[in-house]
Image (tube, grey):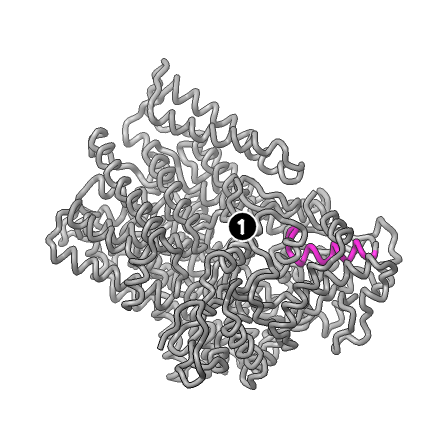
Amino acid sequence: MTIAFGSTPAGAAEEPYYKGRTIRFIVGFTPGGGHDLYTRLIARYIGKHIPGNPSALVQNMPGGGSLIAANHIYKVTKPDGLTIGKWASGLIRQQLMGRKDIEFDSRKFGWVGAPGQDHLVCTIAKASGFANWRAVMASPADRPLIIGGIAPGTSLSDDPRLLQAALGFPMSLVEGYKGSADVRRAADAGEVHGGCWGWDSVKVTWKDSLDAKTAQVLVQVMPTKHKDLSDVPTAFEFAKTDEARQLLEISANGGRLLRNYAMSPGTPKELLQIVRKGFSETMKDREFMAAAEKAGLDTDPLNGEEVEKLVHDLFKTPPQIVERLKQVLLPK
Amino acid sequence: MLDAAMIALENLLVPMRLLFLFFGVLMGLALGAIPGLGGLVGLAILLPFTFDMDPYMAFAIMIGLISVTSTSDTIPSVLFGVPGTSAAQATILDGHPMAKKGEAGRAFGAAYAASLIGGVFGALVLAVSIPILRPIVLAFGSPEFFMMGMLGISMVAVLSGNAPVKGLIAGGFGLAIGMIGMDPQTGMIRWAFGALYLWDGIPLVPVALGIFAIPEIVDLVIKGTRITDVPKEKLKGVMVGIQDVFRHKFLVLRCSLVGVWVGFTPGLGASVVDWFAYGHAIQTEKGARETFGKGDVRGVIAPESANNAKEGGALIPTIAFGVPGSASMALLLGAMTIQGLAPGSAMLTKHLDVTYTMIWSLALANIMGTAICLAFTPTLAKVALVRIHLLAPLVIAVVFLASFQASVHYGDIWSLLFFSLVGWFMKRFGWPRPPIILGLVLSKLVENYLYISVSRYGAAFLLRPIVIIIALLTVASLFYGFRMMGRPGEATKTSIGFKFNFASLFTLLFFVLFALGVFTAREWQIQARLFPWVVGIPVLALCTYQLVKDLFFRQEASDEAEALGFMDLPVDRSVPVSLVIKRALNIFGWILGLFAAIWLIGFVVSVPLFVLLYLTLQAREKAWIAIVYTIGMLTFIIGLFHIILSIPWPEGNFPQLEQLILQWF
């Protein structure tokens, strides 16, 4: 039998709701990026873990830094539990800062979960001359740390800004690069000193230089150290004030949420639970884990409830910190 | 190294892997031949299937696919003047006139042979440069990329041909369109007027299809016959084209080199590689000024050898550094990651066999692709003999569907419509269109890399050796371009006195657009405003000059003199103006109708309905033809776009009908 949208799947003896249906993943970016890749990997295995074994496919809806896709999931998609969206988690932070073309309330999405958490680090080429993070903190204003960024609103630009606002070291942010690969190339070529993004990606793509010790992770922007990076300090160790810690926490929060997935608000609880469970089980799927490991992706998943809590926590940020965020991150 | 190459060849020459390579080639050829679709969509579909394959197989099928899209993209370029992918835009300038002259077969022969040589050349360059890949990549930084962009922009001069002022305005227009969206330095959103669609800038596909494809179809419909009037027996064949390639072997090699280089430069790649090669050919080939744009086979050979060679170049930064220069390369990089192959030095040592498998796949795919295309050429060349009224609805429908693939947003359709009108008027009023594409593609690239270069090195970035070399090439290119500009068509007569006509109205439109652009930018921060003003203010002056010239000093020249040195498709003046206006209104009416229908009732219903109505009401074809054709169109949309590509259709305002049809399938 089929069930009308919005009603609940009836008794267990009935055919499962998802049987013969297709789950669509909508990715707010062009094919080929990290989000797209992760999603295609998940789409391959998730059907196995949802009763009725639905098929799954991935669609790309790029534009507006993925805001088009986010607004689409919120406003247009039917709450029928068949569409799962992936967009930049930075948009949640921008809602907090009151960006005006955001048409959603992040607190109302049906959060599905995140396959991994991004462990934000800043990595630099050795040629920059900074031996460690202490050297950066002690550097005079005319010898700043030169960081490559993309544009305001992207994590590659915003996270260094937050780090700088929290710890107050000399920094020059050069924006206009196309992505982390472009920044990495620029760092290897001596154009910038380095950049800040997830360890997941750094350890795979920057392996050559890390192995050759021509590049090093300088600092990690997480309250706890990553198991691979026990000798790298965390930025939190250098935070002197409460405000600094809160700004860093917001940055870290963005990293944790980076890979999350969501369904449209009003998705029936039962369906959301089914998908959340399927998602969590996919993360434990041996084949999925093997594939992710081969690809060097950290699987340190968050379930839907945990993501939901992180999102709600973000909206509990005190108003004076929100003001400070706006001051640091919004284009002047 | 040679050992690794041989081992890789052995690895690839396993029936199953060859079969996958062949399958990839078939997919690539199909995607290349359908306008607007290219390697990227194919790779995105293939990616999940490669998870279970061994690396040789995975790269055989993926490289097979991307290597040949620029072989088959020639087909619609030559036949309809509709670029098959963005790498085959320049091909239409001479390829399409060749089809009109009854030389479609020759154009195909030349294009395929050039593609083959270019593709294999690209593979070869990649193979021999393996030991020095990493130093090469590191030698090119933001200053060098900026200069490459400038070299590209300098091509505007040569592509402006005998209409320098109009060409420069068109180039400025392209640059301005390229500036729409977020400025990375300030986070300021330029000229988006609140439309989220414009935030990431206008995508290339609807612009290219708008300015080239729709105007061409409109003009073919206005003429109302077939693509060529040359009788079947007199059609020039494939062999002639292949011989042409061998006669111009040095052009092929030079353009292949251009292709590798442009492919290597991130941000350039497919969208401009053909224009680089075409511009280079005009600058270096004897008599090009007189014959290019009118069906000179060299104008086909140049872009076609370059666009296949680019993959070899594009793989260099991808393999050696994991820096993808394009979205297709990013997907390939994704496949590498999934295979557990970290890009970088390991690919040049430990996994050298995989790298060589890629190179062999690239070479073999090009051979397969060319062979398959050649086999179909005699049949395809005859499409030029089909009545245009049968072809027009198909091409228009495909162009609409294709444009929509750019960002799956109605904005794509708006862009298509706007640029169709701009493109058609430009063609009619003698404005060269290629500079728009160069401007659009290079705008952000040049601005960003200039900003990075200056903020990092100051003016000293100009003293880097490679920057100096590319700068000298740019100066030479500009010098040649301006020298060519300086020669006006002969036998021109200037009549003085005020006269207002449509041509001056069109110039006025550009003037107004630029005036508004410059005016609205006045409140922006200096970093966001600088580039728009540096381009906008001089172009505004040029618009004023052109306007005065249009209104008071009209130059009248014979058609031949006007066409001489004009670097764009010539306009057919055989149809009287009054009839042109009538027929143009008619066909643009149909196009607007399709646009409105898509908005109201969605794609899936509108497109077949459009085909049905056009064939019965406009073309007055027999009922059975119209019905079979319409069913074919519906199957095509559902099969390719709905099932295979799984496009998220936007709902029309009355979605029920569409849902009904989709559910039925």
- Helix, strand or loop under label 1: loop
Q: Is residue B381 left or right of residue B10?
A: left
> What residue is rendered at 48% in x and 41% in y?
B174
Task: Determine whether B636 is above or below A283 in the image.
Answer: above
Q: Nearer the viewer, residue B503 or A2?
A: A2
Check the residue under mark 1 and report the chain it is in.
B
Answer whether residue B233 is magenta in the image.
no
The magenta span reads: A151-167
Task: Name the quadrant containing residue A218.
Answer: bottom right
Q: Which quadrant, please, contains the C terminus of chain B? A: bottom left
The residue indicated by pointer 1 is B200
Q: Quadrant of residue B324?
A: bottom right
- Give the residue drawn at x 80%, y 76%: A230
Looking at the image, residue B193 sits to the left or right of residue A238; the answer is: left
Judged by its main secondary structure, the magenta piece is: helix
The reply to whether residue B345 is visible in this rendering is no
Task: Answer whether residue A322 is visible to the viewer in this image.
Answer: yes
Horizontal side of residue B96 vs A127, given as left or right:
left
Front-lying residue, B617 or B85? B617
Give, as a three-letter code, the residue at label 1.
Asp
Q: In the image, residue B325 lies at what x, y percent?
A: 54, 59
Q: Quadrant of residue B115?
A: bottom left
Q: Position of residue B42 (x, y in %)?
A: 41, 66
Residue at image location 40% in from the left, 53% down from the top: B303
- From this view, report whether residue B187 is shown above or below residue B21: above
Q: Quadrant of the N terminus of chain B?
A: bottom right
Residue A109 placed where, x, y %?
Answer: 56, 63
Q: Residues within 10 Å of mark 1 (few under 14, many from 20)?
A: many
